[in-house]
């Protein structure tokens, strides 16, 4: 009796051990979702969420205090499909992450029409108050509306170039951005509308020609007397303010994923770090109520990233603050550390200076650390919640840019010094490689899984992005074990070395059953890292060939 009980206990323990290797998650044997249906009708425009910067930062400071008192468990991102990718939606469109873009596509980016520079004169409708950045709302000779944005006086070309360059690159990554173009014009190209106003948040005042001339006189001019600006096409539709960093918009029935859990927002961290886009706050996002192009009677919200003029190190020179990207504007931990050490320890931002190139900010790669980069304020919840899997997703996208594509985007900044174009391109390439290398090293960067069958043999192939991207060639081994849907081992564990150029193919033995549902566990081992990826494979019901139906990273 004792022997029988002991045998039963050993069998139960063995069964538990066999079932402990796999996660509880399972995937449906269907193709992964590539497009989300979040364009259901929103009959009335949602309430406009007004943005007041000082109030916003106070609220976010208060929220940081209350958040620190809450008991949070880390949550994996939502808004991903079975292959751990982000489907296209009103938030994000798969572009360079899904296909190769040509340099010409980067040159055009989101722009859909000729530059207003070719359609003068421009009618001026409004400006902002003098204490706010110079911005002028115009319509060109075609009647199309634009917002003119200018460089900070004394710092020519930098903000206008950054706005266009970063917009092109974020568009290629997949985000919705405005149609921005660098333009040149003369004061005589402007015609003042009869009802032109100074648009102040607390009221409107008439704008006369004398006041407009005074404002234009404050701006830098080219040697031949022209003014330089970014012409940002007014986003079609009705703007209803920026979306909140946490939670959802209650008046948008399509907004169902709390924003701090959205992969497309959390995964922007490595992209923002790459581009030194630290001005991340609610006022630099925009929801727009648009008509459905297929049925103009229906409407929904589209979600935009806007205002990139302080990226590429421009904020550091306009704010005279070389800490940007290395420390937050108000960084209590850094302040405390400096106090304790009497500021005797060298800080990472010390000795940083912008190059002596017209139109270039304090943008460099020598002191850049992708793992410690921070935006200006700890106020944007999706970046605070981002984990290494979100950052792997973002790094995979930015790693796909070629130098030619990056250079094509930089050219659109219309920088007058060719050396500035080459400098920004080289720094972007260096920071791109550093960013991808870092985040590919923080998890198992296996990707592009493919199950195939040929002449009775079945294989599972995958790329190791760290090796395939030629970012590093560490000593690497893959330990592979296969399980059935109930997490029971179905094949002997074995090891493989990486294949040529990081592409590796492993023998695939499917489990029994009608669909052959199999979980292939791949443990990636390097000298300083071990990570696990579980690839779920099943037979396609229509062809009986194996296909990858799910990916789960640990």
Image (tube, grey):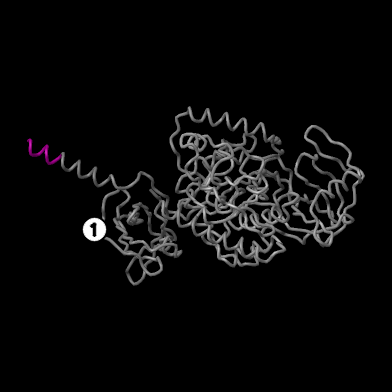
Residue at 48% x, 57% y is 436
User: Considering the image in quadrants, where does the N terminus appear?
Assistant: top left
Q: Confirm whether residue 253 shows in the render.
A: yes
Relative side of 9 to 203, left or right: left
Between 221 and 177, the residue placed more toward the observer is: 221
Task: Pinpoint residue 311: horizontal percent, then vertical percent.
Answer: 63, 51
Relative side of 463 to 216, left or right: left
Residue range highlighted in magenta: 1-8
Task: Pinpoint residue 338: horizontal percent, then vertical percent.
Answer: 50, 37
Residue at 34% x, 66% y is 458
Q: Is residue 4 magenta?
A: yes
Relative side of 235 to 24, left or right: right
Main SS class of the magenta portion in the image:
helix
Q: Is residue 200 magenta?
A: no
Between 143 and 269, the residue placed more toward the observer is: 269
Height in image: 302 above or below 432? Answer: above
Task: Pinpoint residue 364: horizontal percent, then vertical percent.
Answer: 57, 56
Mark 1, residue position: 492
């Amino acid at each position: 009796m004792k022997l029988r009980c002991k045998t039963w206990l050993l069998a139960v323990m063995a069964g538990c051990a066999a079932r402990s290797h796999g996660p509880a998650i399972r995937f449906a044997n269907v193709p992964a979702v590539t497009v989300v249906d979040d364009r259901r009708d929103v009959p009335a425009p949602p309430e406009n969420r007004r943005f007041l910067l000082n109030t916003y930062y106070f609220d976010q400071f208060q929220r940081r205090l209350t958040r620190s008192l809450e008991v949070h468990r880390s949550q994996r991102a939502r808004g991903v499909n079975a292959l751990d990718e982000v489907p296209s939606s009103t938030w994000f469109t798969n572009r360079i992450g899904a296909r190769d873009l040509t340099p010409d596509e980067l040159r055009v980016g989101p722009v859909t029409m000729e530059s207003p520079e070719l359609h003068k004169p421009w009618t001026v409708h409004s400006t902002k108050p003098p204490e706010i950045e110079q911005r002028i709302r115009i319509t060109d000779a075609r009647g199309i509306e634009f917002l003119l944005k200018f460089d900070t006086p004394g710092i020519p070309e930098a903000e206008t170039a950054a706005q266009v360059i970063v917009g092109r690159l974020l568009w290629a990554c997949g985000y919705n951005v405005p149609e921005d173009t660098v333009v040149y014009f003369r004061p005589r190209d402007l015609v003042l509308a009869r009802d032109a106003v100074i648009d102040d948040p607390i009221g409107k005042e008439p704008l006369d020609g004398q006041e407009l001339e005074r404002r234009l006189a404050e701006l830098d001019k080219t040697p031949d007397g022209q003014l330089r600006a970014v012409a940002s096409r007014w986003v079609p539709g009705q703007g209803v303010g920026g979306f909140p960093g946490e939670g959802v918009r209650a008046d948008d029935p399509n907004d169902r994923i709390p924003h701090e859990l959205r992969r497309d927002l959390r995964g922007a961290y490595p992209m923002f770090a790459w581009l030194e886009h630290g001005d991340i706050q609610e006022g630099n996002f925009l929801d727009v109520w648009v008509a459905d192009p297929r049925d103009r009677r229906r409407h929904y919200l589209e979600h935009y990233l806007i205002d990139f003029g302080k990226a590429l190190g421009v904020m550091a020179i306009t704010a005279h603050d070389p800490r940007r990207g290395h420390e937050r504007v108000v960084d209590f931990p850094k302040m405390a550390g400096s106090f304790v050490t009497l500021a005797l320890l060298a800080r990472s931002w010390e000795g940083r200076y912008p190059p002596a190139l017209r139109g270039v900010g304090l943008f460099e790669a020598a002191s850049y650390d992708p793992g410690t980069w921070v935006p200006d304020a700890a106020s944007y919840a999706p970046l605070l919640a981002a984990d290494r899997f979100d950052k792997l997703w973002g790094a995979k996208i930015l790693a796909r840019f070629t130098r030619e594509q990056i250079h094509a985007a930089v050219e659109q900044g219309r920088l007058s010094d060719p050396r500035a174009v080459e400098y920004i391109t080289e720094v972007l390439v260096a920071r791109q490689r550093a960013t991808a290398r870092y985040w590919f090293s923080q998890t198992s960067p296996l990707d592009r899984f493919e199950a195939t069958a040929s002449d009775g043999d079945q294989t599972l192939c995958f790329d190791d992005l760290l090796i395939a991207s030629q970012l590093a060639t560490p000593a690497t081994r893959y330990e592979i074990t296969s399980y059935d849907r109930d997490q029971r081992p179905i094949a002997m564990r074995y090891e493989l070395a990486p294949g040529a150029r990081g592409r590796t193919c492993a023998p695939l033995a499917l489990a029994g059953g009608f669909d052959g549902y199999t979980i292939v566990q791949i443990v990636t081992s390097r000298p300083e890292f071990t990570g696990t990826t579980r690839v779920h494979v099943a037979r396609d019901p229509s062809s009986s060939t194996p296909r990858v139906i799910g990916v789960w990273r640990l």
